[in-house]
Amino acid sequence: MGKTVTIVRNVMEANERRAAKLKEYFDQEKILCLNLMSSPGAGKTSLLERTLADLKGEFKMAVIEGDLQTDNDARRVAATGAQAVQVNTEGGCHLDGSMIEDAVAELDMQGLDILFIENVGNLVCPAEFNLGEDHKVSILSVAEGDDKPEKYPLMFHLSSVMLLNKTDLLPYVDFSLESASAHARKLNKDIEIFPVAARKGDGLDAWYDWLRKTRAAKK
Amino acid sequence: MHELSLIESMLSIIREEREKHCMKRILRVRVVNGALSGAVSDALSFGWECLTQEGDLQGVALDIVDAPLKVVCGSCGKPFTPEDAHYMPCPACGEILGHEIESGRELYIDEIEADIDDAESAAAAAPHTGD
């Protein structure tokens, strides 16, 4: 029979420490950092392409692209003229603080207004790992079904914003904006919800206004 | 889905604590896993089994205590423990929206049971006498 020693240490503490350091750095440099999360194919990259192109004249923006493999997304984003750095997780299901530290070292952070982190497409794991961001933003496309906030509560609970993307497909799919919004508000009554069709440009003004307001608050 | 990397983090915390408390042999580790931590207890057990098959922590038992989700009603403020994380009507007022999570997100190492080298541990704890 051994002795019992009380420990009480958070298993995520190493990542939490890194995230806190990153947050401190982003605060000091007055960079708004947003962590974009969704399932694969919900439209994170299309939303970014559009946002980067439309707000090019207003903000200096950069993107950290997380994917299991390939640099396709970084190339798409870089085509808008924004700085982009690709992080390949080599099969890993999420980005963590150390990957963001490495990516930040590769970027020119001077005078940056907004840093977008496009997380690995996955509704589960990315929510567990803080990256020093100011806000988590989740994107749900209408083709995925309106029960997703109910099935994956943590991601929507932690997000400041939920974009409901591909609203141009609403006539063809069984998706209720009201029901998706109600599910998301169950655990997060303050979540901002913006229905958009990123490729067509519909509804993006509300998202841009949120970005402007949130960016201004960071100064 | 990332339970293996969580186990790796646990193992490095356990090794640090082993040093700190002069543990000769670790017998058992107790972990508390909240209902909304995102980590699945069965997957943690499996990951633990895989990563402690050999090496310095071979054969150490892992106890996982599942901690329930506790919330505070977003409308009337009553604290309660919902049966289901997806549908949480307040038992007092029936509100289903806007509850604050009080606990259930946690994942931490609670305690370690081990044989401890008492002489070494006492020496480590004793104040330096200084010459």
Image (spheres, coloured by chain):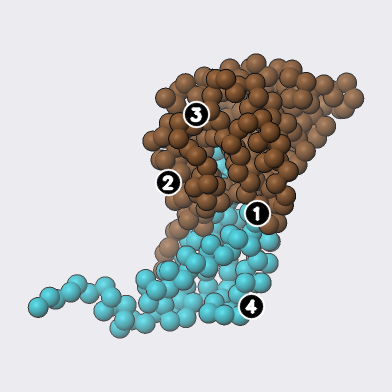
- Rendering coords of residue B109 (x, y %): 50, 61
Q: Residue A89: give its label.
A: 1
Q: Is residue B86 visible?
A: no
Labels 2 & 4 near each other (Cβ < 8 A) = no
Residue picked out by circle 2? A21
Residue picked out by circle 4? B53
SS at mark 1 in the image: loop
Labels 3 & 1 near each other (Cβ < 8 A) = no
Are the residues flagged by discs 3 and 1 from a single subunit? yes
Are the residues flagged by discs 4 and 3 from a single subunit? no
Residue type at numbered disc 1:
Thr
Chain letter for the cyan part: B
Labels 2 & 1 near each other (Cβ < 8 A) = no
C-alpha distance separating marks 2 and 1? 21 Å
Residue found at x 52% / y 42%? A107
Chain letter for the brown part: A
Residue found at x 26% / y 73%? B125
Instruction: Give the mark, 3 or 1, whose residue is nearer the N terminus.
Output: 1
Q: Residue A113: give its label.
A: 3
Name the outermost residue toward the left.
Answer: B131
- Rendering coords of residue B102 (x, y %): 51, 40
In the rendered structure, the answer to whether residue B10 lies left or right of residue A137 reads left
Image depth: mark 3 or mark 1 in front: 3
C-alpha distance separating marks 4 and 3? 49 Å
Residue type at numbered disc 4:
Gln
Instruction: Give the mark, 3 or 2, whose residue is nearer the N terminus.
Output: 2
Q: Chain of mark 2?
A: A
Q: Residues within 10 Å of mark 4 (few under 14, many from 20)?
A: few
Residue found at x 70% / y 56%? A91
